């Protein structure tokens, strides 16, 4: 447990909150909502199919039965409406947790996120806020084709006033989601659906281990937070810094283990606010930086990371900063594994960066 | 290819592009505007089924007749003091608009929007609601703030973006935010407030509150997806909401036909969603009051949302950045068949014997002086672009509750830039 209980994690004192259960990421996310709905009567959960049915990925299972259908309810298929009413509920004083069924469907709600939720505090000088957490499964690797695989995080990190959070383990998912719900600013909470059930390593032709074999599946049943804006060093190393988030944390780790390179792997966990301190310290130590994300390359979040590393660590760099990303195409269906930034692409980038 | 491909002997398809009644220089003909007699519309019970009141989406609820008498079932039978307060508030709104429009022309601010001719659609609506019912206005509902008694100097501070502007000079003029008067922050993006109002009303219902929500948009904005999302949610959850469409005929230079007015009324949008729809003479303060009160009582008794179309006319430009003489006939405003809302209410109270021309003229003078005094007061706090703005670091505040490192760095940069421009 020690290696997955990251620094900065804040758990409540002993007692029943100290109970630990083995959870996959879906169960951990579900547990976070159970805990928050119990603690705060202003938390409401809504979205397409989230009520009686419990969500297409089961993340909201059991919530309506426990908290009633005025606090957990299905919505019309209208992302504009879902986000728009969430903003209004937030203005009333509620703390809505809307689900967008797939990140690929978030675009009809994007004006309400960018022009409204993100700027409510600013334009009213703090008189109105949007304490909403938009949960949405994102990323590929599940043969979802171009409409169930996208990673649109950089569209949101580009917006002043939004926080963007992406967990990579059940333990982190619960602690980060609780922090997101408690946060008084709007948070985009992208859940890497490829690792809902197990830490996918990118070796798609090998069997995937369930979360139960991973230490980070040991999740406290009670309330705990992982602060937003704090990265997690999942593997310490001296030769190279790898920046990743979501599914790609596990893929990068697997490649590092396979290659035997002494890389420091940093799970960003929150893209905005970004933990620049951890990144800067690591890159200054290793002198090399590889950025890995599944999203398309051009104007992706990797571009921002690359620029920040160059601005802050230029005189410590021994090789150009490298990016491994998805290609600048829509997410293909049958050629999914040719698109996915898997072990070969990452391995080649590591070899290149270590050669210099 | 210029004539298109000829494929068969079928007639060629033709695209219909709507065209307004008249353009600059054309004579104006409003003969197609059907104005039913005042008092001719039946008033259903507030609990009526939307299916039994569809005719109210196509007619026009009118209370004041051609002789300015209140007639029919929709007459709200208001006490004298309410009538006179509505009249005074509408006159104040117009006086304020005239003064602040001039202030923009004098270079004291960047932008202003008048609501001339539409005063009843906000003042009478606000009068018919409870003071703590939440309103989600668009940008032409300053009359609500006037009715709820917001300080004029606060409004002008905001318009001038001066150092006393509590919104810290961040918003375009007239985009007020007044939570203490249950007045939501105005966006400027169109119809986004519609689903927000429905969400607020849903929250009020979730909590077992008694307050309802009301929102406004123009007829042009009903084309936005937000309008239809809001209608769907309001219908699905029976949200206690009044959804106002101010049909002032013009969306900047685009006449209402570009929002679908050639085909049906805006009130009739309610029919497809199965909610109550009312179409109201927006220049008749008593009709606006009566319709809003009907909708408010319906919402407050869990009978559901109401869409109200206020049929009115935008007597002036869209904003100070707009010149309507470039796209519509200058005669339209004068010949609008539903008259002027202030003149009509004034004639009504004079007819009741509780008001007269002398008192009205004196009131107009008094209000003009009051607005002038408030303007002078606000000008002591500065006008736009004269250096009496908020401190530079406030630009970075309120993006988030706490200032993250990247904004701290950018704030330091901004302060260095100012120091470089004006060394101490």
Image: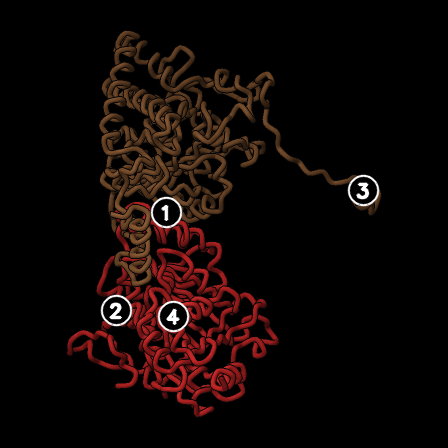
Chain colours: A red, B brown
| Position in image of residue B20 (x %, y %) | 59, 27
Query: What crowding class fits label 1: few (fewer than 14 Cα within 10 Å), some (14-19), or many (20 or more)?
Result: many
Q: Quadrant of residue B290?
A: top left
Distance Cα–Cα, label 3 vs label 2: 66 Å
Which residue is outermost to the right? B9
> Which residue has dot 4 on it?
A166
**Residue B134: percent from left, percent from top:** 29, 40
> Of helix, strand and loop, which one carries label 4?
loop
Q: Earlier in the sequence, mark 2 or mark 4?
A: 2
| Horizontal and vertical percent position of residue A151 | 48, 67
- Disc 3 to disc 1, C-alpha distance: 48 Å
User: How far is the residue under mark 4 from the one under mark 3?
Assistant: 57 Å
Q: Please give the residue where the numbered disc 2 appears in the rendered image.
A: A35
Residue B260 percent across, percent down from the top left: 56, 36
Q: Is residue A198 visible?
A: no
In which chain is the residue bearing label 4? A
Q: What residue sits 36% from the left and 73% below the top?
A: A268
Which numbered marker is on residue B196? 1
Q: Residue at x 43, y 41 (%)?
A: B275
- Of badges 2 and 4, the one in the foreground is 4
């Amino acid at each position: 447990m020690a290696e997955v209980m990251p620094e900065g994690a804040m758990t409540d004192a002993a007692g029943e909150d100290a109970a630990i259960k083995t959870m996959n990421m879906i169960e951990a996310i579900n547990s976070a909502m159970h805990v928050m709905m119990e603690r705060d009567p202003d938390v409401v959960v809504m979205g397409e199919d989230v009520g009686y049915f419990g969500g297409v990925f089961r993340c909201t299972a059991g919530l309506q039965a426990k908290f009633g259908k005025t606090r957990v309810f299905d919505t019309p298929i209208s992302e504009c409406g879902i986000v728009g009413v969430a903003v209004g509920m937030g203005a009333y004083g509620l703390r809505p947790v809307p689900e967008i069924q797939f990140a690929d469907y978030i675009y009809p709600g994007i004006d309400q996120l960018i022009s409204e939720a993100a700027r409510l505090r600013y334009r009213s000088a703090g008189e109105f806020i949007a304490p909403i957490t938009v949960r949405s499964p994102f990323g590929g690797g599940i043969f979802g084709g171009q409409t169930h695989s996208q990673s649109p995080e950089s569209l949101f990190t580009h917006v002043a006033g939004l926080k963007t959070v992406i967990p990579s383990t059940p333990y982190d998912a619960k602690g980060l989601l609780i922090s997101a719900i408690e946060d008084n600013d709007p948070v985009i909470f992208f859940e890497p659906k490829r690792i809902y059930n197990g830490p996918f390593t990118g070796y798609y032709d090998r069997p995937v281990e369930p979360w139960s074999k991973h230490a980070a599946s040991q999740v406290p049943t009670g309330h705990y937070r992982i602060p937003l804006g704090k990265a997690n060093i999942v593997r310490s190393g001296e030769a190279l810094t790898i920046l990743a988030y979501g599914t790609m944390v596990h893929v990068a780790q697997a490649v590092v283990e396979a290659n035997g390179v002494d890389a420091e792997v940093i799970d960003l966990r929150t893209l905005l606010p970004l933990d620049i301190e951890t990144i800067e310290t690591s890159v200054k130590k290793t002198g090399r930086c590889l950025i890995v994300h599944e999203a398309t390359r051009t104007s992706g979040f990797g571009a921002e990371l690359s620029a920040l590393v160059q601005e802050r660590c230029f005189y410590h760099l021994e090789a150009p900063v490298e990016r491994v990303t998805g290609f600048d195409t829509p997410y293909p269906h049958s050629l999914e594994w040719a698109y996915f930034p898997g072990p070969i692409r990452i391995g080649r980038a590591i070899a290149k960066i270590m050669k210099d | 290819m210029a004539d298109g491909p000829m494929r068969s002997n079928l007639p060629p398809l033709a695209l219909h592009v709507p065209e307004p009644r008249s353009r600059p220089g054309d004579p104006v003909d409003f003969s197609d505007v059907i104005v039913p007699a005042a008092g001719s519309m039946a008033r259903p019970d507030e609990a009526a089924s939307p299916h039994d009141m569809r005719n109210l989406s196509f007619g026009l609820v009118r209370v004041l007749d051609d002789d300015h008498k209140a007639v029919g079932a929709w007459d709200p039978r208001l006490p004298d003091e309410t009538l006179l307060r509505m009249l005074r508030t509408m006159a104040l709104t117009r006086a304020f608009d005239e003064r602040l429009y001039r202030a923009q022309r004098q270079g004291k601010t960047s932008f202003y929007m008048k609501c001339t001719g539409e005063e009843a659609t906000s003042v009478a609506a606000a009068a018919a609601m409870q003071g703590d019912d939440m309103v989600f206005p668009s940008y032409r509902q300053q009359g609500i703030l006037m009715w709820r008694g917001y300080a004029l100097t606060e409004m002008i501070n905001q318009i001038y973006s001066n150092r006393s502007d509590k919104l810290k000079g961040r918003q375009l003029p007239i985009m007020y935010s007044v939570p203490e008067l249950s007045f939501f922050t105005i966006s400027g993006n169109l119809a986004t407030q519609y689903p927000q109002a429905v969400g607020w009303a849903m929250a009020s219902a979730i909590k077992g509150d008694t307050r309802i929500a009301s929102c406004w948009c123009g007829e042009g904005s009903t084309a936005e997806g937000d309008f239809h999302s809001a209608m769907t949610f309001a219908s699905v959850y029976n949200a206690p909401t009044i959804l106002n469409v101010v049909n002032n005929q013009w969306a900047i230079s685009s006449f209402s036909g570009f929002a679908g007015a050639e085909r049906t009324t805006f009130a009739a949008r309610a029919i497809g969603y199965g909610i109550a729809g009312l179409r109201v003479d927006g220049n008749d303060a008593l009709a606006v009051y009566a319709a809003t009160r009907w909708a408010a009582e319906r919402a407050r008794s869990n009978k559901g949302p109401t869409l109200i179309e206020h049929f009115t006319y935008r007597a002036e430009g869209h904003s100070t950045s707009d010149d309507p003489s470039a796209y519509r006939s200058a005669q339209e405003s004068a010949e609008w068949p539903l008259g002027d809302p202030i003149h009509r209410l004034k004639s009504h109270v004079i007819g009741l014997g509780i008001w007269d021309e002398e008192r009205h003229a004196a009131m107009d003078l008094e209000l003009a002086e009051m607005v002038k005094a408030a303007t002078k007061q606000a000008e002591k706090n500065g006008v736009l672009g004269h250096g009496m703005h908020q401190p530079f670091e406030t630009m970075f505040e309120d993006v988030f509750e706490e200032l993250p490192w990247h904004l701290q760095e950018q704030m330091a940069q901004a302060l260095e830039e100012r120091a470089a421009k004006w060394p101490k």
